[in-house]
Image (tube, rainbow, N blue to C red):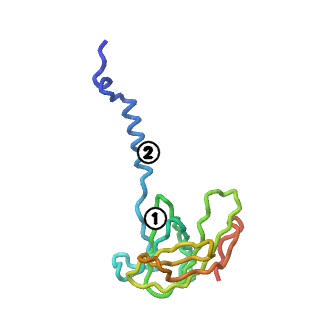
Amino acid sequence: MKIPAASRAGHTPGRQLFFALVAAVLVSCAPLSHRVVPLQGADTANPAGIAIISVDPDYPLLLEGLDGKRLAKLNFQSPLRSYSYTAPPGAHVLWLSSVPYGAPLLPQRLRCYEMHVRLEPGTHYVLREAPARKMALLLRRRGRDSVAYGRRVDNPLIFHRNCRWP
């Protein structure tokens, strides 16, 4: 009986299919690209003329509104997709909320914050929650010094209602 050359080399069709599936799974689990979301028409082509706001992946917050208006789309930070926002420099009011955890049947509360900030052009900021201190923080990316803090304004149950800002 003659053994095919492909079988002798260990390249059977079943083995090739197995390795192709493993490769597809590994590639599909790769992190997605970083996404930049422009707010109020901030020009992303001119980084020196805008402020950039990133979200801390360890203590994330949702940016829900800017200057008294809700954002059309919420962007959830995850290990697979990160977001930054660009905003025009100047005084702004940020509406922020905590990120719900992944157990929907357990009672959860949203922590809602309002933050008054003055953004400088060409500066990179990081948003993070400090739940033990009951506040949201805006830090400069370099040096991590606090620029502004947001006070908690609401604490509703998640299934009851969304945040109410003053």
Identify which amino acid the numbered label 2 is placed on: Val
Q: Which mark is residue 82?
A: 1
The percent coordinates of residue 141 (x first, y second) are 43, 75
Q: Is residue 152 above or below residue 31?
A: below
Q: Position of residue 129 (x, y in %)?
A: 57, 72
Name the quadrant containing residue 164.
Answer: bottom right
Residue at coordinates 43% horizontally, 83% vertically from top-left? 88
* N-term mark: 2 or 1: 2
Q: Where residue 38 sits: x, y (%)?
A: 44, 75
Q: Does residue 80 sit above or below 9 in this rendering?
A: below
SS for dot 2: helix
Q: Nearer the viewer, residue 89 or 152?
A: 152
Question: For the image shown, how many numbered marks are present on the structure?
Answer: 2
Label 2 sits on residue: 25
| Mark 1: secondary structure | loop
Q: Quadrant of the C terminus?
A: bottom right
Identify the residue at horizontal 42%, vertical 40% (top origin): 21
Disc 1 residue crowd, few under 14, some 14–19, many 20+, Cα 10 Å? some
Name the residue: 51% across, 84% down: 117
Amino acid bearing label 1 = Ser
Q: Provide residue 109's location: percent of width, then percent of height.
A: 68, 67
